[in-house]
Image (cartoon, coloured by chain):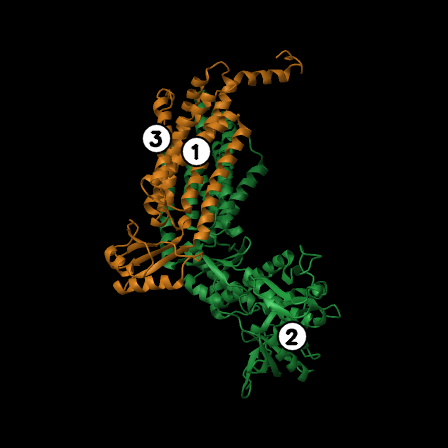
């Protein structure tokens, strides 16, 4: 009989031990979850803990692993939405907003182009007719001068609008590069708004992610229904600009009549007293983007529509040197001081920003309302009771399945069957350990995947034992039979498991939701089972042979 | 000697090709019947593939499908199908039903108003009713999901065929894929014939069946390859029988452990995933059958070019030009 080197044995058993250690928290799911929540809450509160949080925290020792498998919506209950953002809506709005600029530009050269008239056209295309066709070249030049370079990675060197002529019509539409950049912004903005809205209700682990070109997947555990989630998302963020009366540290300060007291978003303990009536609201903001001021410091550029521009221009002209609060959902984002009269509705917010902060602020400013309408293509609500029923059913099925497989293996292979069952138990522990550490979500099909893995995982053991039996029949000694049995079975084990991994990978790539949950658990199960069935079983058998030194064995 | 449970005797000598015109022919007939069933009867697509809405209701009062139907009939939602759900894991006073509403106009999954209308209408006839799950898929997504599902099954089969071709001879790859196509067709056929709900999880089950079936087939091929090198003179047919008999114990053993685990899921896993588990249970049986009676038949028909293989092996040892006259 050959000896496995000590380091190899140590490695195998340490992996097994790690697997067990990292799977154990799942047995105390509620405790560990409360502990984790408390730890997170204490960290965000800056280290101070309430007695309740302290009690929750002590439910699980800090030094033990505290990863638990996140439960999918079908097990925890919650709502799932797949929304499609109508990105093209934004093109129409953008092009529409260009009409006053185009008109003004052409008015300046009226003597050459004649009368200017807007023509009816499809959404996203601006058609302007001029009465003097000879002035077309001048007109085109004037309108093209309105274009600005596209700010994006792929759109370098191109302008935001395309201006062409068709007969006496000037046709203005967004360029391809600008469309892409706009789509990107629209989705980003939608994601940001949705995230803010969902975060406000403070549920655990919401998933908000972009899917494909123009879709957003929203999964919120613990929310009552998809309809509730939809109305939550639909609520628009309220962005307003107020004159600042004073700044205070006193949360209970009396703001005075027709004023209100608002907290600062970033600075703790700072409150602004502002006039209740906003000068202008976010509904009149057409755009905001990160930029740099003349000194090269990060800043945010913004643009109002015509109405907003007038109000903003008048106010800034009369209030130079005074602070002006930008308020989002009753929190002051920042309160810059007005440096000069700002005509044309274009402005720049400077402050102590980093590039990230200015980008975020721009997103927040744009994030007043959803930039485009959303269509909900898919929605699912699962009640928490149904989730609990599913967990119970899954647990019961797993226990019964494990019991049946164990009995059958022991009845078929005696003590060696027991070894396989021990290896199987380690395998299940390792599946949970891997799921917990990588944070893969467990779903009901995922539980089915684990139960299925129990049935399939022993296949490697079966292959090995059947081989060992054959070798024993040929009169080999126990040590040699086991050695050869393991060796010869290996190629079949690898071949058969690799093909299963192929299907698991394809399921993961193509599948969504429940199918993906199944692919993850079976995929991980296949990999861990190869380890446990081959190495761990072997290590256990070696221990047995070393301890008992049997002259003959019966597999 | 200790007691050992053996479903297969230690030495078997079954001729797996003896009834090949019944077994292999039967498989061909079953595949054709399945295709016809799918074409003629169609599949009972779930909302994943057809769009629409399902509402699961739960109540402490008994379900009366007629009353439910009457309650929602005048809401103008078109075709609403209502079925009661039974499950051994339900509590005594747990009565569950599923309502399925046909897809509505447009891309949108469903309007909150129509769900609300249904819920209100049902609450009127049964105060204790709750709605543990409401799922709705718009026609746009369901169209894509169908494509994704088809692509997944085709890609998985192609990936497996490629792997088997890489590891074995092309004849084995053809045999494996034939067995896979057979397994998928017959399983889908069963879903068509019994009009079982066919949704996204069934596709996952099909992929699992592919994985299982090929796993089973590859183990036999692996042994066959070993035997091809060992017994050079034995006729292919006899060698396949020998190989299959040698691995039969393992084939049955693994099928049994897998079916035991799946049986536990069917009985105790709840009604939500029963269709999914049933598909896998049935697929494992079909997969085992196809391993024994389909894959090898194809390889036998195509033949394995053993002479060339031997020549290749021999020429390796010889001079490069030794068989220049060939």
Q: Which mark is residue B106?
A: none
Relative horizontal placement of residue B114, taking residue A164 as reference (left or right): left
- First-in-chain label (3 vs 1): 3
| Residue depicted at x 55% and y 61% | A122
Say which mark, if any, is on residue B5: 3
Chain A colour as displayed: green
Give the Cα distance between marks 1 and 2.
Answer: 66 Å
Residue position marked by numbered label 2 in the rendering = A345
Q: Residues within 10 Å of mark 1 (few under 14, many from 20)?
A: some
Q: Provide the secondary structure element on which disc 3 rests.
A: loop
Residue A545 visible to an observer of this rendering: yes
Task: Indicate the quadrant containing the C terminus of chain B: top left, top right, bottom left or bottom right.
Answer: top right
Q: Which mark is residue B181?
A: 1
Q: How far, Cα to Cα, is label 3 from label 1?
A: 34 Å
Foreground disc of the pair 3, 1: 1
In space, the residues marked 3 and 2 are separated at their CA atoms by 86 Å
Q: In the figure, A499 relative to B149: above or below?
A: above
| Chain of the residue where label 3 is placed in the rendered structure | B
For residue B54, side relative to residue A292 (left or right): left
State the residue in front, A20 or A207.
A207
């Amino acid at each position: 009989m050959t000896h496995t080197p000590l380091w190899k044995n140590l490695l195998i058993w340490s992996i097994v031990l790690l697997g067990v250690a990292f799977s154990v928290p799942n047995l105390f799911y509620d405790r560990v979850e409360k502990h984790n929540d408390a730890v997170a809450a204490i960290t965000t509160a800056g280290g101070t803990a309430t007695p309740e949080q302290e009690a929750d925290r002590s439910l699980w020792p800090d030094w033990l692993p505290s990863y638990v498998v996140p439960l999918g919506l079908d097990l925890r209950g919650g709502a799932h939405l797949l929304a499609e953002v109508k990105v093209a809506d934004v093109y129409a709005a953008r092009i529409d907003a260009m009409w006053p600029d185009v008109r003004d530009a052409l008015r300046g050269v009226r003597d050459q182009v004649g009368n200017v008239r807007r023509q009816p056209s499809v959404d996203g295309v601006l058609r302007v007719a001029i009465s003097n066709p000879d002035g077309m070249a001048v007109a085109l030049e004037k309108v093209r001068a309105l274009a600005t370079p596209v700010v994006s990675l792929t759109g370098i060197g191109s302008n935001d609008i395309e201006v062409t002529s068709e007969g006496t019509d000037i046709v203005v539409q967004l360029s391809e590069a600008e469309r892409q950049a706009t789509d990107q912004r629209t989705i980003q903005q939608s994601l940001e708004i949705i995230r803010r809205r969902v975060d406000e209700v403070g549920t655990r682990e919401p998933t908000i992610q972009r899917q494909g070109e123009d879709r957003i997947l929203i999964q919120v555990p613990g929310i009552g229904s998809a309809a509730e989630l939809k109305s939550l998302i639909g609520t628009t963020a309220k962005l307003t600009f107020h004159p600042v009366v004073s700044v205070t540290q006193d949360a209970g300060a009396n703001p005075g009549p027709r004023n209100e007291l608002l907290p600062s978003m970033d600075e703790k303990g700072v409150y602004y007293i502002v006039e209740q009536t906003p000068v202008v609201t976010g509904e009149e903001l057409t755009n905001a983007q990160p930029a740099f001021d003349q000194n090269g410091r990060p800043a945010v550029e913004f643009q109002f529509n015509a109405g907003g521009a007038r109000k903003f221009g008048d106010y800034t002209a009369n209030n130079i040197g005074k602070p002006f609060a930008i308020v989002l959902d009753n929190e002051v984002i920042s309160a810059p001081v007005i440096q000069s009269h700002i005509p044309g509705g274009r402005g720049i917010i400077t402050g102590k920003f980093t590039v990230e902060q200015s980008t975020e602020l721009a997103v927040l400013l744009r994030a007043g309302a959803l930039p485009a309408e959303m269509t909900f293509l898919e929605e699912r609500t699962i009640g928490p009771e149904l989730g609990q029923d599913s967990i119970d059913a899954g647990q019961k099925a797993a226990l019964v399945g494990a019991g049946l497989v164990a009995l059958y293996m022991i009845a078929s292979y005696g003590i060696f069957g027991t070894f396989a069952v021990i290896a199987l138990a380690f395998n299940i522990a390792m599946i949970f350990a891997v799921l917990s550490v990588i944070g893969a979500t467990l779903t009901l099909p995922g539980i089915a995947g684990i139960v299925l893995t129990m049935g399939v995982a022993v296949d490697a053991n079966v292959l090995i034992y059947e081989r060992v039996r054959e070798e024993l029949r040929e009169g080999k000694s126990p040590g040699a039979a086991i050695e050869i049995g393991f060796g010869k079975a290996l190629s079949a084990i690898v071949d058969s498991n690799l093909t299963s991994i192929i299907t698991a990978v394809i399921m993961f790539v193509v599948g969504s939701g429940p199918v993906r949950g199944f692919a993850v658990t079976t995929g991980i199960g296949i990999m861990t089972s190869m380890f446990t069935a081959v190495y761990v079983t072997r290590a256990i058998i070696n221990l047995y042979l070393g301890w008992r030194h049997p002259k003959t064995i019966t597999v | 000697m200790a007691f050992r449970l053996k479903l297969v005797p230690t030495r078997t000598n079954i001729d797996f090709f003896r009834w090949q015109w019944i077994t292999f022919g039967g498989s061909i007939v079953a595949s054709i019947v399945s295709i016809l069933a799918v074409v003629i009867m169609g599949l009972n697509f779930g909302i994943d593939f057809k769009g629409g809405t399902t509402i699961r209701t739960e109540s402490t009062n008994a379900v009366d499908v007629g009353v439910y139907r009457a309650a929602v009939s005048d809401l103008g939602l078109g075709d609403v199908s209502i079925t009661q759900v039974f499950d051994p894991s339900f509590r005594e006073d747990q009565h569950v039903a599923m309502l399925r509403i046909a897809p509505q106009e447009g891309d949108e999954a469903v309007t909150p108003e129509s769900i609300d209308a249904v819920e209100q209408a049902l609450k009127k006839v049964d105060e204790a009713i709750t709605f543990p799950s409401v799922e709705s898929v718009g026609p746009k997504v369901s169209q894509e999901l169908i494509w994704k599902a088809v692509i997944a099954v085709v890609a998985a089969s192609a990936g497996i065929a490629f792997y088997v071709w890489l590891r074995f001879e092309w004849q084995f790859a053809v045999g494996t894929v034939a067995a896979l196509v057979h397994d998928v067709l017959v399983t889908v056929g069963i879903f068509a014939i019994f009009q079982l709900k066919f949704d996204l999880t069934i596709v996952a089950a099909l992929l699992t069946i592919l994985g299982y079936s090929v796993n089973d087939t590859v183990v036999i091929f692996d042994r066959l390859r070993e035997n091809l090198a060992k017994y050079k003179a034995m006729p292919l047919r006899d060698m396949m029988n020998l190989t299959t008999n040698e691995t039969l114990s393992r084939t049955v053993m693994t099928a049994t452990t897998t079916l035991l685990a799946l049986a536990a899921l069917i009985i105790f896993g709840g009604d939500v995933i029963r269709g999914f588990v049933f598909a896998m249970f049935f697929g494992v049986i079909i997969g085992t059958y196809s391993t024994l009676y389909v894959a090898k038949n194809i390889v036998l028909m195509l033949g394995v070019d053993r002479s060339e293989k031997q020549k290749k092996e021999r020429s390796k040892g010889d001079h490069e030009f030794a068989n220049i006259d060939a």
